[in-house]
Amino acid sequence: MIRRNYSSPLGPERSDLTTRIRIVCALFALLFSTSVLSGCSGKGDTSMESNQQMVPIVPRPASMAVTEGSYTLTAQSAFHVVNEEFEAVAQLFSEMWTTPMGNALRVESSSGDIQLVLDDSLDDEAYGLTVDDDGVTIRAGDASGAFYALTTLQQMLPADISGNGPAPDTAWILPHVSIDDAPRFGYRGLHLDVGRHFFDVAFVKHYIDVIARYKLNVFHWHLTEDQGWRVEIDAFPRLTEVGAWRSETVVEKNLDPYIGDGIPHGGFYTKEEIRDVVAYAAARNVTVIPEIDIPGHTGAVLAAYPELGCHEGPYKVKTTWGIQEDILCPSEATFDFLYTVLDEVAELFPGPYIHIGADEVPKIQWEESPVAQEVMRREGLADEEALQSWFVRRIEAHLNSLDKQLIGWDEILEGGLAPNATVMSWRGTIGGIEAAQMGHDVIMTPTDYLYFDFYQGDPETEPLAMNWANRTIPLDTVYAFDPIPDELSSEEAVHVLGAQGNVWTEYISTPEYVEYMAFPRAIALSEVVWTPAALRDLDDFYDRLALNLRHLERLGVNYRIPDRIDGIDQEGY
Ligand code: ACM
């Protein structure tokens, strides 16, 4: 059902775009000459602008000039690490390139044709990259900048560099370029829901590897759900003994009458596995933000520890989707439990943030609970929204005492925002606007643009996906998003840290399907959050993307072929 990239036949009516891409790429590989490249684009000018379009870098760099000439890397090339802080990143790329290049490139401190130099004048993540007759020179202010320079360099090489097979006949030709690049936003995220469906460590690492190649720097790991708890917690073993497993899963959308598939589903990550993922991500400049979703979306917690609920149960790990009424009761036992869980989570994830969800919390059980009502009387809380706000504030105080910052979905605005909270705006940008106007940091992830679990084409021909309000979110829609809403003044806009794509997995049960939904939409997002707004250009993006898809193919990513470039003869370039 899922359309694979490499099975797409060459359509009988090959588009102009297809033809152009093939010509450009053939010349790109052979020549790297300013005049020839400009001419073959049909644009006939030699400006930086037109040259920039010929090098398939995504996201598009802030500034780039392509000049005449080329430099060829060989298996004898070496990284010249002038400053030792770049040694690890050079080793990483040496390892990545070993198989295709047929040799591990040496990492030297005294010589080499890929030189990495510290430049204190550059911000974190910014870099300069030049390729000339002497080789490659990279300037960066920190290891993340050097990492991004090397991801850019990697995209300039033939796509075989991204494969895991030997490529003895490939010439590793680089065009002469001069690039100065830096991100537009500091927060550039992609999310994965491993609660609805569990994905193993190998896939999670692969996912992180791919997003890092497109300069996304946050992996939001949605670790807990009504349908499964996925992180080992020493103090509460039943969370994974019981909460990580469900008896079966509803088939497609068959809720009434209910049809289950009869297949048990589950899994969880040990602490050792989580540390391994966090370190793998850190090596690629990706911060992992764990989400422990409370007080709703806690069906799996309640199945393991029913005493934390507002009624006696019985509870079970849910087998259906949608908003569930079973939530945590605001008792002291619940806070003791959560503080202990969050202590263990904070110890596992060195990043500054812990996400506590707080989305979609029906209040009916709090309305009926003597415990919840007593808390409201005691604390002078007007209603259950205020009770949720009080609940979140207590959790925030605990996280802050651990030197962690709280992120919550935009429902944390209801009943009053916790003092230091960062808001993840998902029900449109309105919550983000409100929070930024109050001086709170915001991450934009509006459903209309950045929910990658929604259909991206005609539901008749696409695999099952989310479709609230018959919404589809094609690639162009993602590309059109701007994280800074017009409503914000420039002072308020500073609070928009960036944006994130979300991959909820109710209907997404395999790694291949995750990739199909995430890519290339996450790549369009990468340009939204990295590239200066004035340089974004959809046609130019498609040209670069078409060439870049070859790298994804070599990486074994089951991306969806964009409608506009379907039918390209991928063997042709
Ligand atoms: C959400 O999509 N419930 C944050």
Image (tube, grey):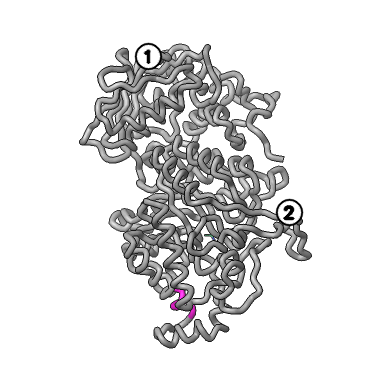
Quarter of the image for residue 387 reads bottom left
Task: Give the magenta part as a residue range.
Answer: 384-388
Q: Is residue 454 above or below residue 515?
A: below
| Residue at horizontal 44 percent and vertical 87 percent from the top | 377
Q: Earlier in the sequence, mark 1 or mark 2?
A: 1
Q: Nearer the viewer, residue 407 or 532?
A: 407
Per the image, label 2 sits on a secondary structure element best described as loop
Q: Nearer the viewer, mark 1 or mark 2?
A: 2
Quadrant where the C terminus lies? Answer: top right
Using residue 51 as the reference point, say whether residue 426 is left or right of it. Answer: right
**Callout 2 environment at 10 Å: few (<14), some (14 to 19), or many (20+)?**
few
Q: Residue at x 31, y 63 (%)?
A: 439
Mark 1 falls on what kind of element? strand
**Which quadrant of the figure has residue 554?**
top right
Residue that mark 2 sits on: 263
Residue 441 placement, left or right of 511: left
Q: Which residue is mark 1?
A: 71
> Mark 1 touching mark 2, by CB under 8 A?
no
Residue 271 visible? The answer is yes
The reply to whether residue 562 is visible in this rendering is no
